[in-house]
Image (spheres, grey):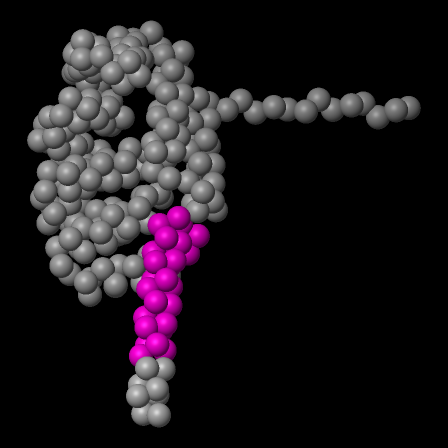
Amino acid sequence: MPKPIKKKVIKKVSAEDEVRNTYEKFVNYYEENSKNINFTLIIVAIVIVAAVLIYSSVQRSSKTASVLHAQAYRAYIDAVTQNDPALYEQAFNVIGKSNGIRRSAILTYYESDLYEKKGEIDRAIEVLEGLTAEFRSDELVMPLAYAKLGMLYRKKGDLESASKTLEILEKSSYPVLRDFAMYIKAGIQRRMGNQEEVEAINARLIELYPGSPYAREVAATIKAREEAENKKAEKGEQENRKEEE
């Protein structure tokens, strides 16, 4: 008699596990392919993962907090897509209501981004500083928060705070953007006149993240400079030999 066919048991995966698996896959992809990934693409990827998390939350529950969370996300996307000041205010309003019921790291990040787009840099910094103090364990949002905070300090001209903020990200255990932090920090140190620190940062960047686009750019710049110096030295030697002859 033919053996009975056993039905394959399919394990159900919760929405939280699906989001976690998606994020872990993104982190692994980043580590393996960082030479092809820039900061903007990372933001897009994290926003997408956040959207999945938000809408899965709404599907599980009709509670006010979950509904407002989704509304805040939609309001933010509409505002930044259409670049409409009126929509900015609507997004601020919905984000404020949602955070008032249940605090969210990603919505707080969106709030800071809206302030930056309005040109209110100090307010954007204030929101991000609060975010980094409140959501330290959020590996999804914290790398973005520290990276943006460092760049906002740089934009404001506070190079010391920018460098210290990026150093936090550089030395963190967060899975992405440490190479980006080192690259931007080196540029800041160069503006501050700390050439030895620049060289030390660049050496660490090349050693730790050889596949990073930032490390590749730095390595190419160093190689070009060394080649130019060698050519200059050779030309000088040739001229000296001619004079001796």
Query: Horizontal placement of 18 versus 228: left or right?
Result: right
The image quadrant where one finds the C terminus is bottom left
Q: Which image quadrant for residue 157? A: top left
Q: Main secondary structure of the magenta part?
A: helix
Residue 61 can be seen in this image: yes
Foreground pick, 54 / 127: 127
The residue at the point 15 percent across, 42 percent down is: 154
Q: Is residue 89 above or below residue 38?
A: above
Range of magenta residues: 210-236
The residue at the point 36 percent across, 12 percent down is: 58
Foreground pick, 66 / 10: 66
Residue 137 can be seen in this image: no
Location of residue 49 in the rendering, given as x and y in whole percent from the top left corner: 39, 26
Q: How many marks?
A: 0
Asked whether residue 235 is drawn in magenta, I would say yes
Location of residue 79 in the rendering, given as x and y in whole percent from the top left corner: 25, 14
The residue at the point 34 percent across, 38 percent down is: 39
Location of residue 184 in the rendering, given as x and y in whole percent from the top left corner: 25, 48
Q: Is residue 48 above or below residue 72?
A: below
Q: Is residue 12 above or below residue 26?
A: above
The residue at the point 35 percent across, 86 percent down is: 242
Location of residue 139 in the rendering, given as x and y in whole percent from the top left corner: 31, 37
Q: Is residue 111 above or below residue 150?
A: above
Query: Horizontal placement of 52 versus 201: left or right?
Result: right
Asked whether residue 215 is drawn in magenta, I would say yes
The image quadrant where one finds the N terminus is top right
Q: Which image quadrant for residue 2? A: top right
Foreground pick, 1 / 9: 9
Q: Residue furthest right?
A: 1
